[in-house]
Image (spheres, rainbow, N blue to C red):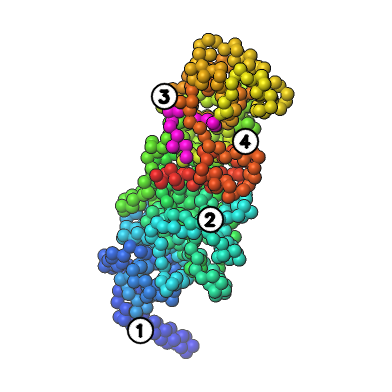
Amino acid sequence: MSLMKYMVFAVLIVTVLIIFYGCTLLSTPNLLYSSTTVKVEWQEKSMNCHGLTKWVITTSSRSRITSEMISILDTTQDWCLLIIGTYSKLWTVPMELNSSHLIYLYHTDLKALPYMLVNYTLLRPSNWKNIGYLFAIEKGAQIIYDMDESNIPLPINGVYLPVEGSKQQYESPQLSEQQLKGKLLWKPLSYFQGDHSFLAQFPTESCLPIVQQHVAVLKYAYSKAFGKAGHKKIVTPKGIFAPYSGATIHLYEALWSLFLPTTVKANIAAVWRSYVAQSLFYLIPDACLMFIYPASLTIDSDDDNYFSKESFKLVEMLKYFPMTFDRFEDALLNVYQNLVQKGFIHVIDYYYVSAWLYDLKQIGYTFPNLPDKSKLWTRNVQLCIMFNWGAAEHTIKMLLAYYMRFFNSILLIRDDKWPNTEYLVDFPNAVNAISVDTKNGWYQQKALLKCLQSGNKNTTSYLFIPDDMFINITMMSTLPTSNIWLNEPGVFNFNDLNTFAKDSWPWWKHPKGTHFQKKFISIVNALPLELKQSLSQNVGFPNRMHGHSIVDSVHIPQVFSGNLSNVLLYLIGKGNLFCEILIPLALDITAGPQNHSYFMECNLWSGDRTNLRSIRQCFETKHFIHPLKLSTGFGSDIWCMLMNEQMKRNYGA
């Protein structure tokens, strides 16, 4: 009897379920999707979202659509909602929703899509969303709002998901020295919530925000945050990395960056994706990253994941990453190759991103065009970097990572044996490191001589600089490459040298007490007739000579390199004469003022080397800033920030 009761009860339950789901099917035709339904109705459902260019993409582990998703469809008629379902049971949609703006795909349905990345779908569930991105782009998505279930979009001025879609002036925070010092990552949320953030008068930046992070605040903190200052939009300072994750709008120019790495924890994959993307933003003219606050609510926070030790290491690697590719997709692929080599991700992600790039091409996505590097004045210039002291490996990597984006060939010079150069294998063969024999002195002039001897058949000129200098490549582009570039020298009469030099110029007497004045007079008097004639023709010797010049940086055209090399060899053989005296003499013998162009120098030796405002002013008006010590956190961050700015100006030209 007891068994009969159970059987009757079971029959009743089954009957109720059949009636319930039968009614649901009848009342909501074409709105109930299971894995089987989607496959059967694929052709019909592929017409959903036809003509829509703005898409919201999310995954869902729930059996019904959430109220937040409903609000998006109700209030944003020009958005399509694509949901990648991870729930194993039937998924239902309320009747009142406009199903033509909704596409739901269960993860097994992704196998029906004709993408190479589909081959890896079942291996990595985190690839499901990557396939969803491809599907949306193929369907015509120009803008994608990437969200997750923990984020709830907020209306801004009554509009859900407003998009900043054009280049215009945006505010960019002027970070203080204390905020910037030694930092690789910037915390936008902490900045927004600081008391100063809405009171400061920000400078403006003209750019296109290709990624727009809707900054999420915890539900309990929203009223306080919004009531304090209202919505705020800023773009990140140049050269500074900032994390973004869920609730992010990607314009078409940034759709390539949506790929989520799959071999890291799911809660940090989107954050690491953001760092990879920012490492390539400089390649896109006028691109920038925007933060809109507050624009989203969240039930949790991933702040610890944003700023983990692993994240700092990742950004440090990306910040100093060499980039020498002609196609944008090759640059992205090479980033992932290096992430694998450095142990940040597994090799399988390299194959995934390769498939991702292949699929993007196949569905017609247009990658950003890289500029024609041949138009940069630096491309056939031999860059020679002289190290007065030993440099740390990360400093050299940083120098090379940035300079290789401008120069095809780089020579590193130091006055001692290089302790280790194995890390140079990360860089192309165009990088070479040599040591200069400093026996009996003459280091800088010997280093310059080695520089002039390092060119090849394509070399048009040589740029010789120290390692602790920021060179303004943008401003130098206005100087004629057919001229010798140097600091504007002082003029003196050789006949008056005995009385003139004693108190006028410190380089005549070396700080160690070696008296160069007499040696200089002796060397000049003993010059061969041919060199004296050149000196006379070029500068008007003996009544006129140049000697008051700082020669830390000098540019020598190829046409003068052979003659200058011979003169340097001769002068070096005559004894130890301080470089600031010998090199101006060699230049006078080689060419006259009619072949000179002069640097405008920002000299920080006697000033405040941490004054950010004055350094920025120098960047706008001077050819170089010296010194800017890359061994300090502040110096390296400023140097990188300025390099990022001039890369944008050159690559955006």
Q: Secondary structure at mark 3?
A: loop
Quarter assignment of residue 392 = top right
Residue, x 59% and y 49% (percent of image)?
612
How many marks do you count on the picture?
A: 4
Labels 3 and 4: the sequence-earlier one:
4
Q: Amino acid at mark 2?
A: Ala
Q: Are marks 4 and 2 in contact (CB under 8 Å)?
A: no
Does 485 appear in magenta? yes
Labels 4 and 1: the sequence-earlier one:
1
Residue at image mark 4: 391
- The Cα–Cα distance between marks 2 and 3, rounded to whole angstroms, is 43 Å
Q: Secondary structure at mark 2?
A: loop
Query: Residue reaching furthest top?
Result: 529
- The Cα–Cα distance between marks 4 and 1, rounded to whole angstroms, is 77 Å
Q: Secondary structure at mark 4?
A: loop
Nearer to me, 264 or 219: 219
Nearer to me, 178 or 332: 178
Which mark's residue is nearer the viewer, 4 or 1? 4
Residue at image mark 3: 457
In the picture, the disc for residue 242 is: 2
Which mark's residue is nearer the viewer, 3 or 1? 3
In the picture, the disc for residue 19 is: 1
Q: Amino acid at mark 3?
A: Lys
